Image (cartoon, rainbow, N blue to C red):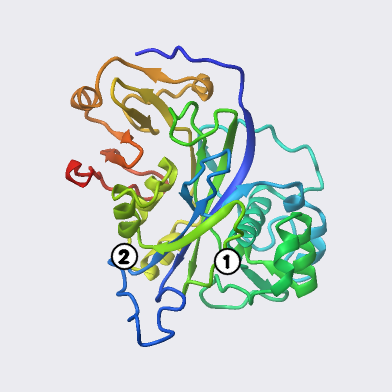
Amino acid sequence: MSGPLRPGPSSWRRAASLILAAGGTRPGAAASSLPLPPPPPAEGFRLLLLQRSAKQGFMPNAHVFPGGALDAADRSADWLRLFAPYQGPPRFGLGPEPPRCGTPSPVPPDGDAGALPDDVALRICAIRETFEEAGVLLLRPRGPRPAGVPGEPAPEPGRALEPVRRDARDFLRLCAHLDCTPDIWALHDWSVWLTPFFSHGHGYNRGRRFDTAFYLCCLREPPLVCPDSAEVVGSQWSSPSEATRSLISKEIWLPPPQFYEIRRLENFASLSDLHIFCLDRASEGVERWLPITLLTADGVVQLLPGDELYLKDSDFLEKVLSTEKSIEEVMREGKKFHRIVIHSRHHCSLHVTVQPQYKHIYPKTYVASKSHL
């Protein structure tokens, strides 16, 4: 194997993504007797997936979780006044920040001493982007944190929505106007993904790479979704198994991180189980993963930490592996797997034989049948 492709360093940015998991039925399902409400999915919950516009330079047409790049407004010191007096800095009652493990971040640290901690700013970013892209607003009234299950969406603020989509600073102004704060306490640390180098035509832009924190939020019921019709052109609530079926039937395309996380979430039988799991591992570390791309003769393998072919070398931030062997040959020669196998855009498999760390859970091995193609 070799790594012959080595351009100049890519431009890295911090970003945040929010996995919204909701129980109950989809919005509008029970509005009339026809059609009947859809049956509950096998997993007992559904996930919000947004379809990116074909005009987007990064992952066009992909179905993804809400999210986007961190903005300077997300770490503005003006948030300090809004969280006061009930929640004090620096972490506003979140507790100690879980350690980030695995690959070090390639993004230089922010030198602004007055800015919010990264974890707080990224949570605000995830909530803001979810509002901008999907119209779902996760806020809490200012005051002592109430007891109960977190994650109740705030009422739709009407015409305030459009200005927020033009300027991230308007989100702070909107929260101040509503006398609310972003519900950062409803978000659970889930995972961190680095954009791999050279995704072989699978929708990434080679010049744009992100260090993306994935958070998870559990909602009792799915709120109404209003895509912005610019960056996002569609939305759907799908269970993990429904999303996988939509992928292999070519109804949607899921980038590898979304595919992996959706398969991971299929481990949970109910929203309650998922919520309890998140609470139980709240103090554990969060792994930052850099998938390493292995180009084979007939496809792509994305190697993840723990796989026997994974190389713990920061040099591979800007490099790929390559081999003249087929995917079948590569798979036949190995035993210790943590990899996403991409035969084609809609034909992906997962092979996991390693044990998870930090009390997390990994997806089960999943091999898509060629009969679906």
Of residue 208 and residue 159, the one placed in the foreground of this image is 159
Which amino acid type is marked by label 2?
Glu
Quarter-wise, where is residue 158 in the image?
bottom right
Within-10-Å neighbours for mark 1: few <14, some 14–19, many 20+: some
Q: Is residue 79 left or right of residue 347?
A: right
> Label 2: how many residues lie within 10 Å, few (<14), some (14-19) or many (20+)?
some
Q: Is residue 267 visible?
A: no
The x and y percentages for residue 193 are 50, 40
Q: In the drawing, does residue 76 fall left or right of residue 272? A: right
Can you say whether 332 is above or below 167 in the image? above
Label 2: element kind: loop
Position above or below: 273 against 282: below
Q: Quadrant of residue 175?
A: bottom right
- Nearest the viewer among 192 and 54 is 54
Measured as percent of width and height from the top left, residue 38 is found at 33, 75
Which quadrant would residue 212 be assigned to in this image? top right
Residue most extreme to the bottom: 33
Q: Which mark is residue 43?
A: 2
User: Residue 43: x percent and y percent?
Assistant: 31, 65
Task: Judge whether 72 appears above or below 328 on screen.
Answer: below
Element on which disc 1 rests? loop
Residue in the image at 65% along x and 70% along y:
139
- Residue to which mark 1 is pinned: 226
